[in-house]
Amino acid sequence: MKRAELTELRDLLSAVVRQLGDEGRSSREMVAEFRKRHHRETAAVTSALVDVALIKLIGEVSERRPTPSLVPGQGDLFAGFSVPAAVAISVPGHAEKQRKAFPKLTFNELTHWYKEHSKAREADVRKLAGVRRLRNLIRPFMKTGDMTVEEGLAAAEAAGAKVQAEG
């Protein structure tokens, strides 16, 4: 499937949306009408459309809260932090960004991702607040930039438990 075919399909879809939008149609009705008018073009790119939909869904699923990271005696490490389950990061040797589970990010990867996203999404400050708070909490416990977020959070939690036990 060629990128040009998807571009052509987008142009056809845009024309249908403009026309039917003037008539006050729902998105579902627009899709049905588009498929009726352009069934051959749609059939030719069905596999690519499924790929696009799945990639979009991966992005949506990645925005969800991570699976609880349970540490004996400490509970869920990420409780109270609004962080995504996975993020797309630049990886040397790969043309496309790679998805990585948030708890498994190294501190260097977290810092790079955070800087990149806080610039790109200044309007989305609330969304990054949990990540910023987590990064600030674990920073003193990161012995190397290769430690994972999960390891740093476990160290911070253990230090907090130790202070409480001593106090």
Image (tube, grey):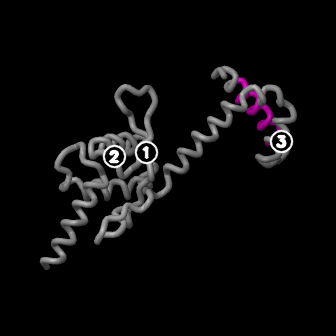
Residue at left offset 38%, top offset 45%: 118
Residue 20, compared with residue 3, is above or below; it is below
Question: Which mark, residue 63?
Answer: none
Q: In this figure, which residue is indicated by the disc labeled 1?
A: 87
Question: In the structure shown, which secondary structural element does the residue marked by tag 3 occupy?
Answer: helix
Tell me which segment is drawn in magenta. 8-22
Circle 3 residues within 10 Å: few <14, some 14–19, many ≥20:
few
Label 1 packing within 10 angstroms: few (<14), some (14-19), many (20+):
some
User: Which residue in the protein does label 2 denote?
Assistant: 105
Quick one: quadrant of the N terminus?
Answer: top right
Q: Where is residue 162 drawn, in percent x and y?
A: 17, 71
Say which quarter of the image contains residue 39.
Answer: top right
Kindly identify the residue that appears in the image at 79 percent across and 49 percent down.
26
Q: Amino acid at mark 3?
A: Ala
Which residue occupies the foreground of this view, 76 or 116? 76
Q: CA distance from mark 1 to mark 2?
A: 9 Å
Instruction: Tell me the quarter of the image containing the C terminus.
Output: bottom left
Q: Is residue 28 magenta?
A: no
* Label annotation for residue 32: 3
* Res. 91 image quadrant: top left
Q: Main secondary structure of the magenta part?
A: helix
